[in-house]
């Protein structure tokens, strides 16, 4: 009896193959996620960046928790005052949960954070969140104005000096620029603040030296915070501009006789965004630390002066809340900077297949 031969076998085609189906729904979902990540590198980048953010938040909260636990002094005694009796201190320790294990207190700390509870200030007897909400607007005003001044002045200043010193021209300007910006870049913020006070409040009483009384009171604090960062940004922008001006695509653009303004805006500035944003993100942490000194020197009613006072008064609960807020702001700014860099420069995203 002859075996039945299929049409495919008679014409020499290989037998059809069947693709193995996934064993369960989880495998199907995993394959779809992998395919989506391969098609869109933004998903992989955002996932990695989100994981980094979560890890950083956990590390920040843990550090803030341990900082208060290992500082000298008894929180129960500090909250009641030096005249409290031993029984009152023991009762207060029980109310605060200080008799529990460190691990149990750690989990309770996270639970309070999810509820928006940062604790109560020992000195003011007010919720820490309320104190921060009162002081934060003054600090944010100072920070936003400082960042605007840094970006608006630092980038054009660096590009202007690069154009004027390109090809070895104006060596005196190159030397002067390097000397002045080098000094202010490494100068501590409190030194810049002292120089500003001497020049513009003592020798020439143009601006008020302390307080938050009007538009003129913002000048010296913003100047003290912004000047070192402006000098640092200008030095980096100048170096990057000189490098870009020697690139082949800029020579090609010049050969087309386009205007100088269009050349700098469309070609040069576009290639300065990534390094400038990177440096600006790194400088923001320094601005946070510098604001503490500036607000103290100029008696600015913000978070900086509050944290100095709380450290002097050993108000550890308030210190802990301010550290968490400052750390959260820095992490948020770094996330925004990373996303902006990835949007402007796709080469900065390391994709996975």
Image: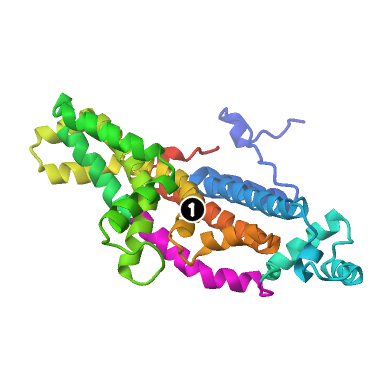
Q: Position of residue 254 (x, y in %)?
A: 12, 34
Q: Position of residue 203 (x, y in %)?
A: 27, 54
| Pick the front one: 77 or 159 | 77
- Asked where in the image residue 103 lies, by quadrant, the reply is bottom right
Q: What span is colored magenta in the figure?
A: 124-148
Question: What residue sits right under mark 1 in the picture?
Answer: 293
- Up the image or down, 51 lies above or below 79; here it is above
Give the quarter of the figure containing the N terminus: top right
Q: Residue furthest top?
A: 168
Q: Position of residue 14 (x, y in %)?
A: 61, 30
Residue at 66% across / 61% down in the picture?
Answer: 313
- Asked where in the image residue 241 lies, by quadrant, the reply is top left
Task: Answer left or right for 83 relative to 210.
Answer: right
Q: Residue furthest right?
A: 87
Query: Circle 1: is it few (<14), some (14-19), or many (20+) Cα within 10 Å?
Result: many
Q: Could you say whether the residue bearing mark 1 is in a helix, strand or loop? A: helix
């Amino acid at each position: 009896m002859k075996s039945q031969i299929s049409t495919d076998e008679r014409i020499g085609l290989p037998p059809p193959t069947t693709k193995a189906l996934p064993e369960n729904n989880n495998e199907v979902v995993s394959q779809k996620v992998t395919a989506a990540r391969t098609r869109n590198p933004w998903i992989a980048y955002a996932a990695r960046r989100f994981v980094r953010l979560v890890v950083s938040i956990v590390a920040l909260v843990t550090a803030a928790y341990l900082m208060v636990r290992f500082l000298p002094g008894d929180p129960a005694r500090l909250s009641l005052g030096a005249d409290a009796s031993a029984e009152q201190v023991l009762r207060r320790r029980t109310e605060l949960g200080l008799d529990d294990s460190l691990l149990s207190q750690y989990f309770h700390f996270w639970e309070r954070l999810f509820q928006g509870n940062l604790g109560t200030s020992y000195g003011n007897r007010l919720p820490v969140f309320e104190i921060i909400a009162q002081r934060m607007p003054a600090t944010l005003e100072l920070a936003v104005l400082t960042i605007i001044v840094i970006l608006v002045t630092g980038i054009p200043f660096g590009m202007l000096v690069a154009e004027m010193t390109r090809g070895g021209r104006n060596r005196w300007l190159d030397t002067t620029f390097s000397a002045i910006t080098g000094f202010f870049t490494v100068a501590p913020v409190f030194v810049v603040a002292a120089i500003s006070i001497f020049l513009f409040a003592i020798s020439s009483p143009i601006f008020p030296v302390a307080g938050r009384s009007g538009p003129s009171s913002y000048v010296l604090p913003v100047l003290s915070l912004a000047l070192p960062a402006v000098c640092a940004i200008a030095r980096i922008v100048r170096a990057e501009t000189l490098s870009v001006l020697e690139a082949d695509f800029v020579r090609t653009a010049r050969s087309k006789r386009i205007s100088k303004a269009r050349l700098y805006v469309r070609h040069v500035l576009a290639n300065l965004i990534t390094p400038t944003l990177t440096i600006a993100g790194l400088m923001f942490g320094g601005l946070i630390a510098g604001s503490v000194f500036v607000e103290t020197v100029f008696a600015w009613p913000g978070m900086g002066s509050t944290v100095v006072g709380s450290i002097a008064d050993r108000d550890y609960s308030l210190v802990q809340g301010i550290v968490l807020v400052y750390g959260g702001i820095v992490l948020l700014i770094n996330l925004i900077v990373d996303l902006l860099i990835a949007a402007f420069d796709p080469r900065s995203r390391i994709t996975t297949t």
